[in-house]
Image (spheres, rainbow, N blue to C red):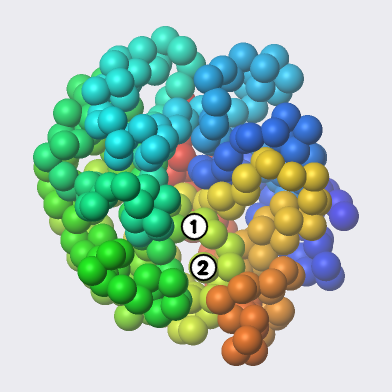
Amino acid sequence: MTLCGNITMSNHSFRYTGPIFDAHTHVIDIDALKMLVKVEDEYGISKALTIVHGESIQEYDEMFPGRFIYARYFSGWTLFTEGPRQAVEDVKTLRERGYDMAKIHFAPFWSDRLSDIEHVPPIDSHDFDVLFDALMDEDIPVLVHIGDPDTYFATRYTDAKVYGTKEDHISEFENRLHKNKELIFQAAHFAAQPEPHRLQNLARMFDNYPNLNVDLSSARWMCREFGRNPEQARDFLIKYVDRILFATDCVASKLDRNYYEGRHSSLRMLLESDVKKESLPFVDTDTVNSGGTFIYGLNLPENILEKLYWKNAEKIHNL
């Protein structure tokens, strides 16, 4: 592999050679983080937002000075069982403790994990008004997970009485966007709407909410859904490029180089190349029994890549 000129991986040439910011990663294990950083270096990523699953960022700062921007993870276990009171107090000191963002995870599976709670509060619940208001008052952007792939609702979340519908989750998120119009939102996984039939609704949300941004994690989800209609996906990314951030959602939790490489190579191939029906370099469990997932390169222009990879993040973070 070389970083001089075009970057090459698996016989594919990546055109873009400028700086790349990964807007969505996680750190759990320090040795795994070292491996992730090595892979990031090889794929041209010079800085990343990392979601911290713990109490201290000092060790990461000392080991990789200036490498990361940190997001504080607010555990659903606490939020959904005890309420947001402690989180609100936490928000007031985030900046002074070195955090630039908050991460809150709303997903249907919380109904399984918290079986003692009859109804897990949705993102637009009045219970969470004080938390999102505190983030807005402290000018802390928030990264939110609002929903899962359509494939999950067809297999795992079929009981709407327990999990709600995907439309429910998207609507609840829009209610929150409306309530907190001055708060910067980064909705993970393309706001759970990379599926071709959902892009029109996401476009409407972009048009109505200037505070909405999305990221491109996860690789298999984006490759699978964009590949269903590459021309539509390409046109959408170009039109709304100012609101979209490159991201892998890599979780530094295991010493598995193939895991990290697969996510980076597939996303860069998707965005920069013109490949047709290239096999995803790792297993997509959602399509393993139906033929697999393939990459159809979008071959985005250089100025569009520059925004996705770096410039859009500059508007949210001090890079």
Q: Residue at x 37, y 48 (%)?
A: 114
Q: Nearer the viewer, residue 144 or 76?
A: 76
Q: Quadrant of residue 237?
A: bottom left
Is 129 on the left or on the right of 294, as rendered?
left
Is 176 on the left or on the right of 138, as rendered?
left
Q: Position of residue 20 (x, y in %)?
A: 61, 44
Identified by mark 1, the residue type is Leu
Mark 1 or mark 2: which comes first in sequence? 1
Which quadrant: the N terminus?
bottom right
How many neighbours does mark 2 have within 10 angstroms: few (below 14), some (14-19), or many (20 or more)? many
Residue assigned mark 1: 216
Q: Quadrant of residue 30?
A: top right
Is 168 on the left or on the right of 141, as rendered?
left
Q: Quadrant of residue 9?
A: bottom right
Circles 1 and 2: CB atoms closer than 8 Å: yes
Q: Position of residue 117 (x, y in %)?
A: 27, 47
Identified by mark 2, the residue type is Met
**Is residue 145 shown to the viewer in this render?**
no
Q: Nearer the viewer, residue 166 or 37?
A: 166
Residue sitting farthest toward the right: 1
Q: Residue at x 64, y 81 (%)?
A: 288
- Count of numbered labels shown in the rendering: 2
Q: Position of residue 139 (x, y in %)?
A: 28, 25
Residue 29 disc label: none
Residue sitting farthest toward the bottom: 290
Q: Residue at x 30, y 39 (%)?
A: 80
Label 2 element class: helix
Is 3 on the left or on the right of 83, as rendered?
right
As drawn, 209 above or below 162: above
Residue assigned mark 2: 222
Label 1 element class: loop
As drawn, 36 above or below 93: below
